[in-house]
Amino acid sequence: MPSRLSRKFNDCHLRIIIVGTIFFILWIIIVIRLAQLQIIEYGKYKEASQKLRTIEKEETGERGQIFVEELNKKISIALSSYHYTLIAEPINIKESVEAAVKIAEILDIPIDEENENFKNLLIKLSKKNSQYEIVRKDLSQSQVEKIKNLSLTGLYFEKEIKRFYPEGNCLSHLLGFYGYRGDQKVGRYGIEEFYENILSGKDGIIKGERARTGALISTIESTVKESQDGSDIVLTIDRTIQSKSCEILEESVNKFGAESGTIIIVNPKTGEVLSLCNFPGFDPNQYSLVKDFNLFINSAISHYYEPGSVFKVITFAAAIDDGKIKPDDKFEDTGSIKISGHTIKNAAEKIYGKVTMREILEKSINTGVIFIARQIGSSGFLSWVKKFGFEEKTRIDLPTETVGDLRNLYQKNEIYLATASFGQGITVTPIQMLMSFAVIANQGKLMKPYIVKEIISQKNSYLSKPEEVRQVISPQTSEIIKDLMISAVENGWGKRAGVKGYLVAGKTGTAEVARSGGYSSETIHSFIGFAPADNPRFVAIVKIDNPTLVNFSDQTAAPAFGQLADFILKYYQIPPTEE
Amino acid sequence: MKQGFFHDFRNIDKTTVLIFVVMLFIGWLNIYAAGYKESHNSIFDISQNYGKQFVWILIAFVLGFTVMLTDVKFFIAFAYPIFITIMLLLISVLLFGTEINSSKSWFQIGGFNIQPSEFAKFATALALGKFISSIKSKTITFQNRIKAFSLIFIPFAMILLQNDAGTALVFSAFVFMLYREGYISGLLLSFAVTAAFLFILTLVMNEFIIIAILSIIAIIAAYVLRNKRKEIFLVLGLFIIMSAYVYSVDYAFEKFLQPHQKNRIEVLIDSKIDPLGAGYNLNQSKIAIGSGGLWGKGFLKGTQTKFDFVPEQSTDFIFCTIGEEWGWAGSFVIISLYLFLLIRIVIIAEKQRALFSRIFGYCLAGMLFFHFAINIGMTIGLVPVIGIPLPFFSYGGSSLLAFTVMIFVFLKLDAKRLDLL
């Protein structure tokens, strides 16, 4: 019996011990597991906890402004403003009705269940399973602050930069616009694109603590990376000349029933662009409404065309610099000339008879220029043309510049030399053409055109300097050509480009437009000139594409130039020199 | 009744009462820390969890006091009526209750929610005590065993119907009492432990690897026992049963568990699965506790819990706040306090002359142990996330009041142990 009793006692004790042991073992397991988490792996969890709590918020750097100078004052022609959109994450909104009432108060929405706006707001905030609802666009800065101060969960703002261009159409091609490429907002076309890296601010990062809902607990912010504002840019453009030239261009294009047109005005001594205008333009404030993307193209630097008779000046300059001709050399015109089986005639099939070289340019006699080009020869002529900067970029600070096409001149056939001498069979861009004329106005030096005068960053500023590309012709030659061009305006086709009391040098051009298979009836009228001829302050090209109401440029581009020159000379307050 | 209730107050086990009070106080401070808001910085602010918990604590003291004033025979005499009443409440909550977190186990009264299933634990402990202590025969018959199991199964099934698997699982805590009273043999217990162990192993490892390991063990055992034919057959039989079990667990896991249940278990194995779903809770909980380090971040300085990273931070995941703000040292104190309380209850239970009292004590200890093990286990990633509160710490009245009643009934039984037989 005692043995049975003790066995029973033992069995009891065993059961108590087992129960106690189970409790104790679990206690040990938990203590060890806690030690693993809190002591051994402490570093890992500490880091995870910090990472979870910190939120990195982007802070956008402001985009630089674009200015023009006027009477030593900077006037902004492209500036940024911020637009805020209120976004809700209804999934994180606890009291949607309460939130709706508070927001409605700030947004001036009547708190009335019958009100359509209030109803919409309430519906948006109550979409419990939604993560993204646009509540309101274009909030004011003060509304943003007020809503932030409510410190409601599930609300945040999206900041959007909007670019404003006060001058509208007038500077459209020059400035481009700030728009989307893919899903990124960048400068498109014009200065905005070319100087994207300089204008755009660098985004910074702000670090702060956050709750799970994403709300930033702003008291513990720190800057990880400073945001940087973009630099400002000052243009060489003169706003007065720019708007006047745009006005004249638009008027001319409309008056002559033309398709389009371009005016570029440059200071020949420095290469500073004073005005650049194409018609039609577009409103960069509403670029998204433009359906035809061709409208964005800056034809002043991108459009290549056959220049026509204005190119005769280049032929003359080459021959005179080469010593092949002198202004008073004689030439017998028979009205036509035969080259490699082709017959080339003068414009309007005129026969001039015995003329001087000066008269050839004044009257724009094709046969005479062919004679001159033949004196230079094919290869000599090509290298002269290239020396004037054709078939190479002017390196103007605008995107999408093209170079034109001199391919025909590389061929041995003399017919190409002949046509090129009066500007057919080769293509050039308006800016190339203008800069080649600036050579004559600038003692034979080719300059690089530029639009940005100054870049101003927060720390320092950079001033552009005029850049000489090369000496193309001697100063003496340039004086001779200048003299011939003055005659061309005074006695020749360029009469209507003249300004009473001033010496104006220039040349007209009426080019035929090549279409596949030959020349069409379309023409491009242009006039390039500078004034005052003895001390040129500006050189300008007026180009009018396909005017339908008038045939020759002496009636279209030349008078437009005259109007422009008259305005600029008076604007610059240059006293008249002539009777 | 020569000895009035003053006698009972003198005889009450003061250690247990002290631990109880200390735990409630620390628990309250932790709920304050977990839900602390600068705009509501008073710990008595009734609009916040911590203010409400203060009210619950006051009610708990009143309730404990009331229990001490009640004649101890009342609980024994009314064990069955209490049990039946609570069972009726469990049925009516299914019909008229409010659904919170997809479990239909709450009555809403005023601003407070009452959960009858919390009181079902107390009622079941009373009924089990009454039933087992009333059996006159020394041996345990099969019939009685079935009856005892049924007393546990009925509330278990009804709570399961409320879709509250966590609370239902708590009823398995009665095994400690059943084992102590001989209703479960050691063999059965070891079977249960082995089965649980293999179950978890199957979820963690490929079932073929487990079967391979089992066969190696079987081969070694067979070699050792090569001269004993009977034992070799036993080993072989066990091996076949275990392999089949492993295989069927895997099959059942894939086939029968609901996605969210499966997810909770899978997440336990690899918390990187679905880090914003079920794994999110566990990950956040581990980060909160782990980042507390050895000494913790300090009172009210916990960031993970306060800024809502940890879900249910003042109820089921309250231990995160302890771990985060008080570190390993503070956690060690709390869980040691628990172990101390459990062992204290077992010791007191063993002192009882009345079988009813001992059974009740073991039920209480088992229940506390189960809540403690599962709740802390889940916050530190040892067991799947099962939503049961940590007694005395988690915010909530039902659990607190239910455990208060159980503790004080037990202390009253203990104070009267010389009068009871």
Image (cartoon, grey):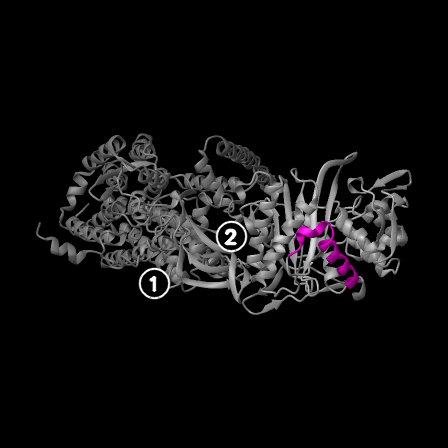
Local crowd at mark 2 within 10 Å, few (<14), some, or many (≥20)? many
The magenta segment: A478-499
Front residue of A11 and B183: B183
Answer left or right for B69 relative to B305. Answer: left
Local crowd at mark 1 within 10 Å, few (<14), some, or many (≥20)? some
One can see residue A471 in this view: no
The secondary structure type at the circle numbered 1 is: loop
Give the number of the disc on residue A564: none
Classified by dominant secondary structure, the portion drawn in magenta counts as helix
B339 relative to B248, above or below: below
Q: Amino acid at mark 1?
A: Phe
Can you identify the residue that label 2 sits on? A165
Can you identify the residue that label 1 sits on? B299
Q: CA distance from mark 1 to mark 2?
A: 57 Å
Is A492 within the magenta? yes
Q: Could you tell me which residue is drawn at 48 percent across and 32 percent down?
A: B252
